[in-house]
Structure formats: structure tokens, C-alpha cells
Image (cartoon, grey):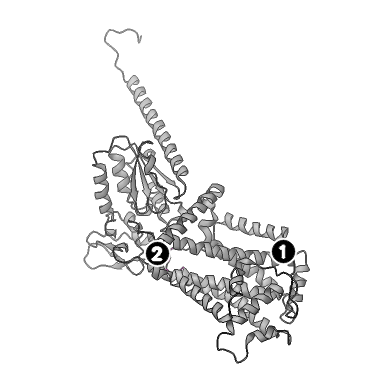
Amino acid sequence: MAATSRPAEKLALRLLTLADSGFNRLYGWKYNPLYQSGTIAVALLLVLLVTGLWLIFFYRVGTPYDSVARITAEPWLGNWIRALHRYASDAALLAVAVHALRMYAQGRSWGPRTRAWASGVVLLLFVFVSGWTGYVLVWDSFGEVLAIEGARMLDALPILSEPISRAFTGERPVPSVFFFMNLFAHVGVPLSMFAVLLLHTSKLARVKLLPPRRMMWALIGALVVLAVARPLAMAPEANPLRTPASVPADWFYAFWLPLSRSLDGGTALLGAALTFLAVLLIPLVAKRRGEQAPPKSVVDESICIGCRQCALDCPYEAITMLPRTDGRAEEVARVDPDLCVSCGICSGSCPPMGVGPAGRTGRDQLSRVRAFIARPERKPGELVVICCERGTPSLEKDADARGIVLYPIDCAGSLHTSVIELLVRSGSAGVLTLACPPRDCWNREGPRWLNERVYHEREADLKARVDRRRVRIAFANASEPARAWAAIAAFQDELRLAGEQVAEEAVALDLECEPVAIGDDSGR
């Protein structure tokens, strides 16, 4: 079953699911941007790359402020492209932060996912550094503040014989090499992000780096409209001999300024390093140990038929097929415990039910559902609602009053279709599986494979003998009980209508086949 969440994870998850439900009401789960925060960040990175390449042709390290001012003063392309570049950088930082919060809240930051978490933290740092250097390149009053704060922190390190801060005292002009180094970092860091991104997704199957096209173009279009509607203005030029009355700041990248400016450079640098290290080491804190650690999947090789379905369905490429020599089949499945996250999706993939985490294989699921069916409180004609424990809302309070019985599972993707068949054949009015929204499955592809097995004959498929009118799949997150109840009520109405139609067909058949009494001349 699902591992116990830590208090901080529970709080983060609660806040996140509340935000998710709000966006679901606006856009539906298919186009909820919070569900696509990772792919949105990649799309925004491409926007930044394209707009940045255009801007770099007009930037001059010898006259940084003047060259940016000329770009900003150009109304047809320069101003809105620069604005698009800035707004996309803010949105990219926000998207990466939301993606990291979701991974942490859903307990997806440790174990085999540690490398993805660590590389993701590095990507967040790269986005931040790229934004920082970009603002310095403008060399306005805000860029000057960022440069001075960075110099103060670097001066705490015994790197150079002369303090870097002296370059910004006004004794002499800031050398062009300073802007060249910032430009090099501003361009080089984003390019290196693509290599880190490959590492970030290297252990995932069927990686999708970009959001759905409609969402991606809608996002880019919205940023373009914002860039045109709210063009950027130039702040005063950096001048170490003059203190501006106010400094316009981008608080996405400068939220830390009030705190750092109240500390000496060494303390500020130490605080930044410790913060980065703490976030990087979250997998060690979040890791489940002992009894809380979920068991890895294992293969019962005596019944493995080498169908390859578990290897095809595994979202993390933790299962490989190897040659076997006992003559039972050509291949046998093997699980790499270093890659397995115990999602259990392989349990629902296996026709002979020979793979899965301990206690959650298809055979274990059958034993559990038979015990559920045999309970004395079960009543014929009940609607059974199979609930994903990880993300669907709690429905226990009103279950009896609404005529349903709940059957909790760990993940919809791990559900073997034989469980649905047994529930239907045991006298249930119908079986509704309530899963997480497909774009927010904690195990990436659970609802997708369940839908394929139930309706599209993917192994291990729901057999044709099961009446599909009595089977449904619906989606809701933990903060959407109204959506869940609406799906349940709609299915109950469908079952009621289907029952009435069956009864009418039976009556019509009886009337057609009613025998005529001997001697009755009414039919003449």
C-alpha cells in the first residue's frame, strides 16, 4: 500500500491538490498547467533560447546599457521580444519550482528517483544563475544591485587577491571583461541545461519533454500578448556614484535580496550554500526505511510466459527480458531493484499474475477481492467504487447513504482486470474505478494503462465476457469530492437506465413468445 507521508509532505500535498482542483475547474485535467509544470519548463527554455539568440545579436559588451536601451526602444520587434524573454524567464523559474514541489509532496524524491531529484535541483540552480546574469547584463540599477551582492559573497572566498567589489566602487569604469564573463555564463548555462535534462529523464520510459501542443501554443501566445500589452521600460543606468531613489526589481529572482543585504557577504554565501545543500539532500530525509519502505517488484519465474508486457508497461524501465534456458519460454522478466519504485503497474500487466511487489501481485489481488466479496455485510446490487489511495478524495463518510461500497487500492495502474471481473460477476450492480487524473498519476502512466486494459484489449485485458456497461473509469484528485460524487451519480443513473432497458427487452420477449390458448379464435 502507499507509504506513509511525512507531515511536511502532507501539508505541501494538501496545498497543491487545492490549487490543482481550482485549475481543473478552469481548464479540466487535460490542460491543467500544474500537471504539466515540468514540460512547461522545457517549452519555456526553448522560448528563452530562441529569443535569447535574437537579443544576443544586438547586445554589446562595450556598451551594455546603451545596447539594451536601443533594443527596448525598437517598437516592432526589440521591445516585445525582450519582454517575452523576461516574462518567459519568470515563468520558467515558477514552473520548475512547482514541479519540484509536486515531486516532493507526492514522495517522488527518493530511492530510484534520487538522481532525477538531484539533477532537477541543479536545473533549478541553472535557471536561477541564468536569470541573475541576464539582469546583470542590462546594467541598470537592478543589475548593479545583483552584481554588488554577488561580488560581496564571492569576496568571502579566498579566490582573488583583490576584492571583486572594488570593480563597482566607481573608481574606474567596469571592465568589458566582466560583461563578457556574464554573457558567457548567461549563454553557456542554458545550453548545459539540456545535458542535465537528459540525465534528469534518463531512467524514464516514453519521456514527454513538451506539453500538449494546444497548451504549449496557448502559453506562448499568452506570453506574447503580455509582452506586447506590458512592454518593458528601462530603469536608470547603473551608477556607483549615485544612489537611486528606488530600484525596480524582479522578485522571482531577487526574493532573497532583503535578507542577504542585511548580512555580511560570508554569512549570505554560507546561507545560500546551506539552502542549496538542504534541498539537494531532501532524498535522504524523505526516504522510507524499515517497514515503511515499499517492497520492490519480483518475478515468479516458474509462471512467467515471457510475454514482455510488464517490461513494456513499466514507466521506469526497471524490467528487462533475459533469455531463459529451462525451455518454458524464450525469455523471462527480471526486475532491477535499483530502478524499481514499487509502483506495481507490472502487477496489472501480467496475464499469469507472476510479477509485482510482495502482497500486490495479481494473485494477491484476487485473494483480497475474494475476501472482500465474502464479507457478510456485502449486498447484491451494490455499486463498488475502486479508489486509488494516493490521490482520490475520501468518500467514506457518505458511502452508505449513497449506496456504494468502497474498495481501496494503491494505484489504478496496478489493478488487475480480473479484480473488476470478479466484482461484476459477484452480483455488484457495477464497478467504477476512481483514479488520479491521468496527467497527475503518481506513477506516471497508471490510469493510461488501466484504460487500455479495460477498453482496448491491452494485456492483461478485461475479458470480453464482462459487460462493459457495468464498468466505468473516472478521475478526481484528493480535493475534488464533488467531481467524484458527480461521476458516481452519473454511473448510477446509467446503470439504472440500463437495468430498465433490460427489463423492457425481457417483457417484450415474453409478449412475443406468449402461447395462444387452444380454442382461442381471437388471433384469427
Question: If you read the primary sequence from the N terminus, does the residue marked by circle 2 or circle 1 appear first?
Answer: 1
Nearer to us in this view, 335 or 240 = 240
Q: Residue at x 51, y 50 (%)?
A: 21
Where residue 134 sits, quadrant-wise, is: bottom right
Q: Residue furthest bottom?
A: 161
Mark 2 → mark 1, Cα distance in angstroms: 41 Å
Q: Is residue 61 left or right of residue 131?
A: right
Q: Where is residue 345 shown, x and y percent of the image? A: 36, 57
- At a point 55% along the width and 56% down the height, the residue shown is 33
Residue 316's tag is 2
Q: What amino acid type should be assigned to the residue bearing mark 1?
A: Trp
Q: Residues within 10 Å of mark 2 (few under 14, many from 20)?
A: many
**Magenta span dominant secondary structure:** loop
Q: Is residue 1 left or right of residue 157?
A: left
Quarter of the picture holding the C terminus: top left
Q: Residue 507 or 249: which is nearer the viewer? A: 249
Q: Which residues are magenta?
A: 201-205
Residue 80 circle label:
1
Measured along the vertical axis of the image, is residue 348 above or below residue 233?
above
Give the x, y percent position of residue 288. Answer: 35, 65
Is residue 218 shown to the viewer in this render? yes
The kind of secondary structure element at disc 2 is loop
